[in-house]
Image: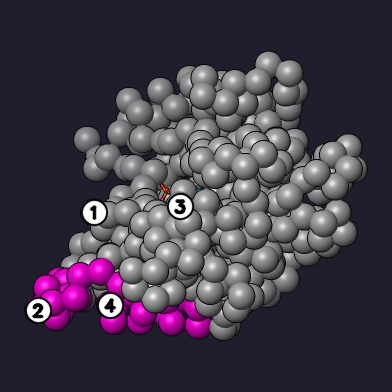
Amino acid sequence: MSKPLLTADPQAGYLAHAEEIRGAIDRVLAGGRYILGPEVEGFEREFAAYHGGGECIGVANGTEALELALRAAGVGPGDVVATVANTASATAAAIQQIGARPVFVEIDADTMLMSVAALERMLEAMKGRVKAVVPVHLYGQPAAMPAMVELAHRHGAMVVEDAAQSHGASVGGRKAGTWGNLAAYSFYPTKNLGALGDGGAVFTRDAALAAKVRLLRQYGWRQRYVSELPGRNSRLDELQAAILRVKLRHLDSENAMRQSLAARYLKLLAGGPVRLPVTAPGVDPVWHQFAVRTPKRDALGAHLATRGIHCGVLYPMAIHRQPAYADATVKLPETERACAEVLCLPVHPGLETGDVDRVSEEILGWGRS
Ligand SMILES: *Cc1c(COP(=O)(O)O)cnc(C)c1O
């Protein structure tokens, strides 16, 4: 039996850089600073530079990055935040945790990202009550950023990009994460830039917003023991920051690997039994997932699993259908169709082109049977 293939493989990500990562861990252990020290500062500087300048604030995870970004953007209890329903429940959880209310915008049938036309309809229908828009760069495909930022700002809404799946992606040559007022990143181990534990960051080019996020992530302190704002504890730790500095150095080459695997899938599966992912013009995706579609998704997933190919389903249930956020009045047919049809094939830097050939042959064979 050939080796099992997984949708993501954080252990392979560690082993590929084991020596550098162990060196970084030893440096932190010997250094004696374990929270908000030189590694967090170094990572914040390097990840900001990766965006071509701006400020990065390390936080505890991606959900809290969204919460703090939204709070810095002025979103509070009772406010309305527009996002999509085919996302990690974390996106909705962050909105709800700060007392705001998520409203869900329909997706584009081809890209499965927030539809610009649907966003415009929502902003008009809500007549200035949408305080912020959270586009999700799902699967490493950035949403239609210039158009959405223009629309949101025209309607008085801030933009917080959910960039948890899009480290390094760009739109028109400009990095995802730099378009909105703020962006939230997750460094959960399976992400394109993954820690070996939890981690997250807020990115912004606005110095005042950055200063506010810095206060909010640590008890509202500017000066130690004096809370200026009702902040919380959401700190990135030194070990994760040191590991992320190693991983960041390899992000571009690992994304390039994902891009070449995706290009091979697109070529081998063209004309085959599944609908292939669609990338909008001018967009450079980073293939956090390679999401194909078929109404027989469960059958195909089961077929591949018997052959040692383990696919993911991101996400099987739209947010407004989940018990915690259920709202029967919400009708999003394209979103629900996507949730019923998507299947995420293995795509990560630990794979080889031969693995893509094997997955593709199995899918084509299944289509003929
Ligand atoms: C992973 C993810 C998050 C949450 O990040 P955590 O670090 O797990 O809190 C939020 N949004 C999206 C789209 C994600 O993929």
Distance, label 1 to label 4, CA atoms, is 26 Å
Residue found 59% across the figure and 21% down from its top = 326
Q: Is mark 3 within 8 Å of ligand 1?
A: yes
Tell me: 26 left or right of 353: left
Q: Describe the element under mark 4 as helix, strand or loop.
A: loop
Residue 43 belongs to the span the image colors magenta: yes
Asked if residue 98 is positioned above or below residue 149 in the image, the reply reads above
Task: Tell me the quadrant of the picture where the N terminus can be found.
Answer: top left
Residue 226, position in %: x, y? 39, 69
**Residue on which disc 2 sits:** 30
Q: Nearer the viewer, mark 3 or mark 2?
A: 3
The range drawn in magenta is 22-49
The amino acid sitting under disc 4 is Gly
From this viewpoint, is residue 131 visible?
yes
Q: Which residue is mark 4?
A: 37
Q: Earlier in the sequence, mark 1 or mark 2?
A: 1
Which callout, 2 or 4, points at the residue further toward the start of the chain? 2
